[in-house]
Image (tube, rainbow, N blue to C red):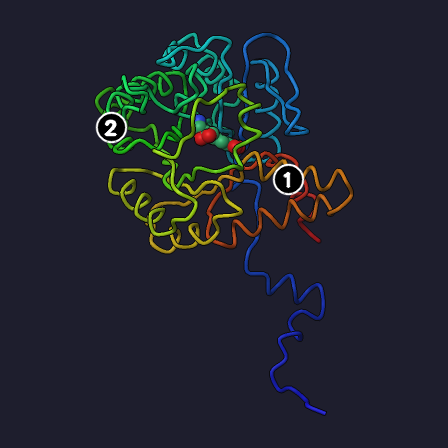
Amino acid sequence: MISPVIRPRRMRSTPALRRLASETRLHPAELVLPMFVREGRESVKITSMPGVVQHSIDSARRAAAEAAAAGVGGVMLFGVPDVRDAIGSGATDPMGILNLATRAIADEVGDALVVQTDLCLDEFTDHGHCGVLALDGSVDNDATLERYNEMALIQAASGSRLLGLSGMMDGQVASVRAALDGSGFQDTAVLAYSAKYASAFYGPFREAVQSTLTGDRRSYQLDPANRREGVREALLDIEQGADVVMVKPAGSYLDVLADVAAVSAVPVWAYQVSGEYAMIEAAAAQGWIDRRRSIEESVLSIRRAGADAVLTYWAVELAAWLTEGNHK
Ligand code: PBG
């Protein structure tokens, strides 16, 4: 019989040893809750994301306060406007839903967590693209930057502390940074969705923001085949002054996340997107996987791959589990 000298199982043999040997730990403060806010007084359920709703401004205030009480690090706000047009006018209307919700939530939670906003036009355009269109129907990069700059100033003035640039336009970080600095918003931070892939996993998000897309986003979001390109985008955004860079989606892009984390001098976050949420909820509802363990493992894996913080629709529930499990 062979008797191994090296026995890695030794360190796994008791719960206390396993706890001490654990390389990665989750904490509520590094979780960010994405939230959808619609117009009108009622909140509305999102069928493809069981447990997630489009909030009214009032219910969003309450949910943000709950998130703060749970110790969650921040909220990321998305607006669901009633009316859309070609240039996404609602995005730059101070009375537009996203800007109103930002003000209301910032007033409610103060500094208890970081209020962040999605800076992108797709929720506000009738064609569903992340920018304005040129005459030939393509997304006009530089004309879109002008719109992003206007959005940035209004979001900052509405109380957003961290602007989530998710549109994947070239030069968007430098452009928005200069606009903010030129208007006295030097302290408003920029989160660059640097490596944002053209992913099928955003499917349920379309229902969440009730937007329909003409065509696809492949001329601006990254090709899922490309790993190097994700790193290049992150490095460019850091050069342009990004305060945080992000990889999105998370679970299917852990290699990109690890690569970016290895070279980034700024925090690296990851977005566990709507489809990742929906898949686990659907399988768990069938009884095919253990819901809580799957959620914990999925977020832990994103942290292990190199994310400093994770945007996840489970932020509040997970924070509660982590707090109750503190002495386990
Ligand atoms: C763009 C944006 C999207 C998501 C976040 N910001 C959609 C897209 O680019 O198609 C998706 C988030 C999710 O699926 O949870 N404003």
Element class at badge 2 = helix
- When the figure is inspected, residue 48 is found, relative to residue 271, above or below; the finding is above
The answer for how far apart the CA atoms under marks 1 and 2 are is 36 Å
Residue 265 pos. (x, y %): 32, 49
Considering every residue shown, the one lying at the far right of the view is 287
Depth check: 225 or 37 in front? 225
**In the rendered view of the protein, which quadrant contains the N terminus?**
bottom right
Q: Residues within 10 Å of mark 1 (few under 14, many from 20)?
A: some
Element on which disc 1 rests:
helix
Question: Which residue is identified by label 2?
Answer: 175
Circle 2 Cα neighbour tier, 10 Å, few/some/many (<14 / 14–19 / ≥20): some
Upstream in sequence: badge 1 or badge 2:
2
Q: Where residue 176 sits: x, y (%)?
A: 28, 27
Q: Which mark is residue 279?
A: 1
Task: Specify the amino acid type for callout 1.
Answer: Met
Q: Position of residue 155 (x, y in %)?
A: 38, 19
Residue 114 visible from this viewpoint: no
**Residue 187 picture quarter:** top left
Q: Residue extending furthest front?
A: 136
On whether ligand 1 comes within 8 Å of the CB at mark 2, the answer is no
What residue lies at 66% left-to-right and 75% top-to-bottom? 10
Tell me if residue 242 comes above or below residue 307 in the rendering: above
Residue 224 shown left or right of residue 154 in the figure:
right
Q: Amino acid at mark 2?
A: Ser
